[in-house]
Amino acid sequence: KIEKYEDLVDSLKEKKKLRNVLENTTYPSVMKRACAYLLDSIISFPIIILLLIATRKVNTSSTILYSGILIQLLNCFTLNFYRVFFNVKFSGTPGKLICKFKIVGEDGKNLTWNTAIKREVLYIIVSIIYLFLFYSAFFMNRGEIKTFGDATSIYSTSIFYKINSIIMFIIYILDFGKAKSSPKRQTLHDKIAKTVVVYKYV
């Protein structure tokens, strides 16, 4: 009986080792995906710089409302569109492709526009929450605001900024924390869209 038990333990250990090998050669870790995200940030840096330059001009302009809203919308949704476009056309953003990753559906098929947008829903919601809180502070302090820079300064010291920071922290923790308990290392946004990030061997 003891020998049978030992054989069973050895068998379970071997299965666990095999599973770990399969996971490590099929699904990138959260840290490796973070590296791909960092690469995407570097690649999109010129666009961000242009938006920052535009924001700087808006901050000192007296036409604070319409131009400011336009710049903020561009800032909030540029990265979302960037990811959706590349995920549909190339099965991954440039950062992921450099790291030899690709994004596919749980069925192994390439992403459709619908699936790619679903995958970004969580972060589109984050952007919408930010805009809602920013403009709540904006309109509550409308009489004190002369330039868009004033609006940004007021928001950064308001309770709305703190609320937004807490919400973003919770969402990021829930999103990537999900990958730790997932056999396929799926984040929450992967689960929502039924997608998976895998190594690209061909």
Image: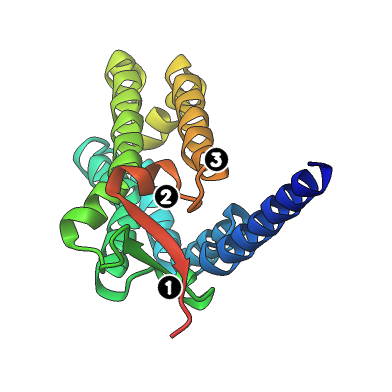
Q: Residue 77: x percent and y percent?
A: 29, 50
Which element type, helix, strand or loop, lies under badge 2?
A: helix
Q: Is residue 130 above or below residue 191?
A: above
Q: Nearer the viewer, mark 2 or mark 1?
A: 1
Q: Which mark is residue 124?
A: none
Residue positioned 33% across, 64% down in the render: 104
Residue positioned 47% across, 15% down in the render: 159
* Apparent side of residue 199 relative to residue 91 in the rendered image (left or right): right
The residue where tag 2 is placed is 56
* Residue 65 quadrant: top left
Task: Specify the quadrant that holds the C terminus.
Answer: bottom left
Of labels 2 and 1, earlier in sequence is 2
Of labels 3 and 1, earlier in sequence is 1
Q: Which mark is residue 181?
A: 3
- The amino acid type of the residue labelled 3 equals Ser
Of labels 3 and 2, earlier in sequence is 2
Task: Specify the quadrant that holds the N terminus.
Answer: top right
Which element type, helix, strand or loop, lies under badge 1?
A: helix
The residue where tag 1 is placed is 94
Distance CA(mark 3)–CA(mark 1): 27 Å
Q: Nearer the viewer, mark 3 or mark 1?
A: 3
- The amino acid type of the residue labelled 1 equals Pro
Q: Nearer the viewer, residue 96 or 150?
A: 96
Q: Is residue 60 visible?
A: no
